[in-house]
Amino acid sequence: MKDRTDLTLSVSRRTLMMGATAGVAALAMPRVLRAQEKPTLVTSIRSLSNPYHAVWKTGAEAYAKWAGLEHVTLVSEGNSEKGIADIKAMLAKTGGNMVLNSDPNDTPDARPIVEACAKAGAYVVTQWNKPADLHPKDFNPNYVSHIEFDGIASGKTIAEILFKTIGGKGGIVALGGLISTTAAIERKKGLDAALAANPDIKLLDFQVANWKSTEAFDLMGNLLTRFGDDIKGIWAANDDMGSGALEALRAENLAGKVPIVGVDGIKTAVDAVRTGEFACTVTSDPFWQGGMGLAIGYNAKIGKFDPTKEPPEHREFYGKAVLISHDNVEEYYKTNVDAKPEIDWNDLWGRVTGAIRT
Amino acid sequence: MTLIPGRIAAVFGGRRWRSLAPLAVLIVLCVLIAIANPNFIELRNLVRLANSAAVPLTLAMGLTFIILMGSIDLSVEGTLSVSAMVVVLLAANDANGNDYGWWAVVAAVVAGTAMGFVSGLIQTMLRIPSFMATLGMWFIGLGLSVYMLSGSAIRLNDASIRDLALHRFLGLPVAVWVAFGAFLLAAIIQYHTKLGRHILAIGGDEDVAKLSGVNVTRVRITAFALAGFFFGVSGVLAAAQLGQSHAVIGDGRLFAAVTAVVVGGTALTGGEGGVVNTLIGVLIVTVLANGMILLGISPYIQQTVQGLMIIAAVALSLDRVRLRIVK
């Protein structure tokens, strides 16, 4: 027994060493440093394994191509430490001559990221996550802007469209996101607000499917047992859960008979809006987020505008969400799915809807 | 000092009662839920229950063999996502022009089996513990799916494969029959083949098994490949049910599968339990999830209830008194 244990240990240690050596070599190999005058554009996102961030990256690349700049994508894989360390490494490599558009992995991450950028002289735009007491104006001029999308408004808009679709009365069920996340909490608040304004609509049950289609699929089957035909519509806090619920309906021959609404505008949902199985979806437009975050930072960096002289609603603002419903889905499909979206990258503030609530 | 559940068990006849504990838990659970909400025993709900148990059951069949050996396979989610990725990319889909029909299903199951086979090779040839070897395979599989699907969700448009979930045979979706077939296959392997007995022997005491002439290396590799086969099948079922595949299609399935195996009474230390236990374990977990919705338990405390149930089921089903060390 003992011999075997020792052997296992020594082999795994050697394997580990070999792995580490290979890793170091791989790090050292690519991208020789060049002195460059044009700043490098840097995108920092959570992962490439979800459709949302994959589109974000396409938008960032589209802008970089349009502006004729070099672009690098950093992926944190949901690891805050890695996200921050990668950004610091890029700052060191570019000597601060860079523009960062970051979707910080977690709320507290925004502070060290912004501080490191300000110290190195880089320009940074953050999206979605930042601590409430961290403000762009405290890091002039480097912390240019922070962008979010109003979850309450999204949750409310889709709820109202759902209510209208089912004729203003009847029962609905709601599928919420991961309980502790801001987006889940805000979108539910929006739903609650819409429910308060429509007393004839009854919320049969609110359940949590943790943003996942797989969980929503199982959950929806169970909800059908409990409420059966009383379910006239389904409100989902994101499209992925909505599409899971849709497949559960399909298994019972109910697809298209019970309308679903969601948030995010993923392709499955857009397709479902076309076939009438979804009533609508609303998207923050990650293509725009990925490109425009860089555009805002880059224009500040080259002095097109002075962040210190911009009004507060340009420093911390809600972006305009795009609603995709039966009325505009064909148009949206043509411009966003069949072709790459055309965005006027000079229109920096065109989608500002107002300053972020404090 | 005897633990209380052990004492209760002793009163009712010791070990024999204990091996029936998971079944008792399942029955009690069903009766309680049915009393609280008669909709539970509606035929439609039973069909839904069977449908949501299909994927976890097929997965857990594979995992049972690994846990019986006293090993663990963490590659569940990675293998499942590779298999779902392969079937979607090779069958009619909305990302490329492939349309290989049922060959895509065969390829997906082969891919799953191959992943398991590699896990087995890594474990036995490089002598890396199964925990680390399969952890590595998990990430390799996930990375592969992310790369091949370029991070997005791809729709499965092949109607005949989707019929696994949408078509019904004798009132049950085909996926349920497939899962049932997987169960029968697993039961035959465990109770009627040499491989099954050798797996159990290795889990009981590897050194003794070795001395009795069991080719431990070969059995281990075969068992991991077998597990990969079941994961591959469940990947196909998951893709058929959801009508799409994305890299994170397996999210949360590992934990659910391990829970089902353990709740069913298979010991993590190996050598005790089996696929019938796992069937009951899967049903307990599925009925519980269904029941909590039927009873209208707030989503904010559902996880807590689930945790309590797991502890209760394991406490009842394992003979704690015989365990000299608890770690």
Image (spheres, rainbow, N blue to C red):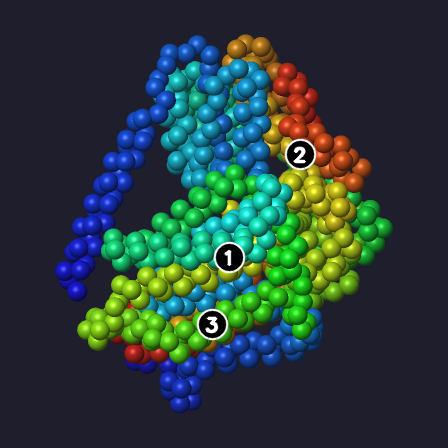
Marks 2 and 1 sit apart, C-alpha to C-alpha, by 32 Å
Q: Nearer the viewer, residue B306 or A228?
A: A228
Chain on which label 2 sits: A
Residue neighbourhood size for the residue with mark 3, other residues' Cα within 10 Å, grouped as few (<14), some (14–19), many (≥20): few
Q: Secondary structure at mark 3?
A: helix
Q: Amino acid at mark 3?
A: Leu
- Image x and y of residue A351, in percent: 68, 25
Residue A348 in view: yes
* In this rendering, the label closer to the viewer, 2 or 1: 1
| Residue drawn 70% across the image and 57% down it | A250
Residue A158 in view: no
- Image x and y of residue A290, in percent: 57, 28
Chain on which label 1 sits: B
In the image, residue A159 sits, relative to residue A172, either above or below, namely above
| Residue drawn 27% across the image and 58% down it | B124
Quickly name the residue at label 1: B106
- Image x and y of residue B39, in percent: 70, 73
Q: Earlier in the sequence, mark 1 or mark 3?
A: 1
